[in-house]
Amino acid sequence: MPTKSQFPDEQSMDGSFERQEDAFRQWISHDGSTGYPAEPDRYHLYVSLACPWASRTVIVRRLKGLEGIIGLTVLDPIRDERGWAFREGPGFSTDPVNGFSFLSEAYQATDPQARGRVTVPVLWDKRTRRIVNNSEDDICHMFNDAFPQSQETIDLFPADIEAEHTRLAAFIYEKVNNGVYRAGFATTQESYEKACRALFAALDELEPRLASARYLFGPRIVEADWRLFCTLIRFDAVYHGHFKCNVRRILDYTNLQGYLMDLYQQPGIAVTVNFDHIKRHYYYTHDDINPTRIVPIGPALDLTLPHHRENL
C-alpha cells in the first residue's frame, strides 16, 4: 500500500504524484487592460531560492532588468507543517511589505476560501493587497512582455520559434522538471520506476541535442534553457540521492554538464543559486523521505570550470 506522502492531496491512488493547479492566474498588462498595469514598485515577488519554480522567476527578473522595478523577498528554505515562513536568516528575511509571518497569510488575504498547498513563487500587488499570480510560467511571461524596461533586454520567448519552444518547454516540464518530483514522491515501486525511467529517457534525448548546439535553440538562450537549468542545477546535489534519481548524475552527461556550467557562468546567474538553501529545504523539509533530517555535506561541485561550449 502507498505510504504517507509529503503532499497527500497530490497523490494518486496508484502512488504517483500529481501536482496541484496554481490558484491565482491574474495578468499584468503593459496597457492596464487587465486591471493590473505594469507600474514600477507596485508588485513584489515572494520566493524560495530552494524551489526550482520560484528560482526561474528570480532569474527572469534579473535578466529582464526588473530588479529596480519589482521587489523581492526570500523565504526561509525550511518549510514545516505551517508552510513557507518569513524569518530572519542567512539569505532570507522577514516580510518588509505586509509583515506576514507565513506565506499562507497572503493566500488568505487574497481568497479566504483558498485551499490546497501554499506554493512559491507569489507575485503580490501592493496596491490591491492581493496575489496577482502564483504560476511561475505566467510570471516569467509577464516579466518578459509586460514591463517597458523588459523590452530593452533579451527576449526569452522569441516569436520565430514559438511553436517549437512551447513544445519543448512542455516536454521539459513534464519529463524533467516535474519528472524528478514524480520519482521522488512516488509511494509505490511501480510508480517510482515508471517516473524515473521516463526522466532519464528525457535526459538521454536532450544530451545529443546539445552536442552541436550551445543552447537548446542554437546560439541564443531562451526561457526553456532556464527552465531546464533550474532542475539540472539541483540534480546532483538533491535529486540524485534524495529523490532516488540515481541512474546517472548530470556530471555523467558530457553535454548536459557543460551546458549547465555555461548557463551557471552567465552574468548574474550564480548569485541566484544557493546550494545551502536547496539542500536544507529538501533534506530537512521532506521528513517522510529523509526522517533523520540529516543534510549531506556533499557533493563537491565546481561549476566555474571551463566548459568550452563557446566553441560550438
Image (spheres, helix red, strand yellow):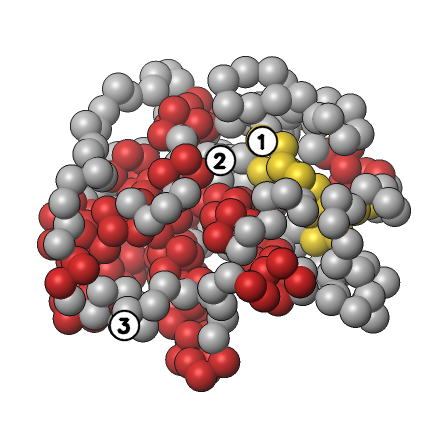
Disc 1 packing (10 Å; few <14; some 14–19; many ≥20) = many
In the current view of this chain or complex, which residue is farthest to the front?
152
Measured in 3D between alpha carbons, the distance from the residue under mark 1 to the one under mark 2, in whole angstroms, is 7 Å
The residue under the point 12% across, 48% down is 252
Q: What element carries label 3?
A: loop
**Residue 234 at least partly seen:** yes
Residue 18 horizontal/vertical position (percent):
51, 54
Q: Which residue position is annotated with label 2?
A: 49
Q: Label 2 near label 1: C-beta < 8 Å?
A: yes
Residue 95 sits in which quadrant?
A: top right
Mark 3 vs 2, N-terminal side? 2
Residue 88 horizontal/vertical position (percent):
60, 16
Q: Nearer the viewer, residue 11 or 1?
A: 11
Measured in 3D between alpha carbons, the distance from the residue under mark 3 to the one under mark 2, in whole angstroms, is 28 Å
The residue under the point 47% across, 64% down is 154
Residue 289 sits in which quadrant?
A: top left
**Residue 3 at least partly seen:** no
Q: Which residue position is annotated with label 1?
A: 74
- Split into 4 quadrants, where in the image is the N terminus? top left
Q: What element carries label 1?
A: strand
Name the disc covering residue 218, or none. 3
Q: In this view, does 254 lie to the left or right of 188?
A: left
Mark 1 vs 2, N-terminal side? 2
Measured in 3D between alpha carbons, the distance from the residue under mark 3 to the one under mark 1, in whole angstroms, is 33 Å
Disc 2 packing (10 Å; few <14; some 14–19; many ≥20) = many
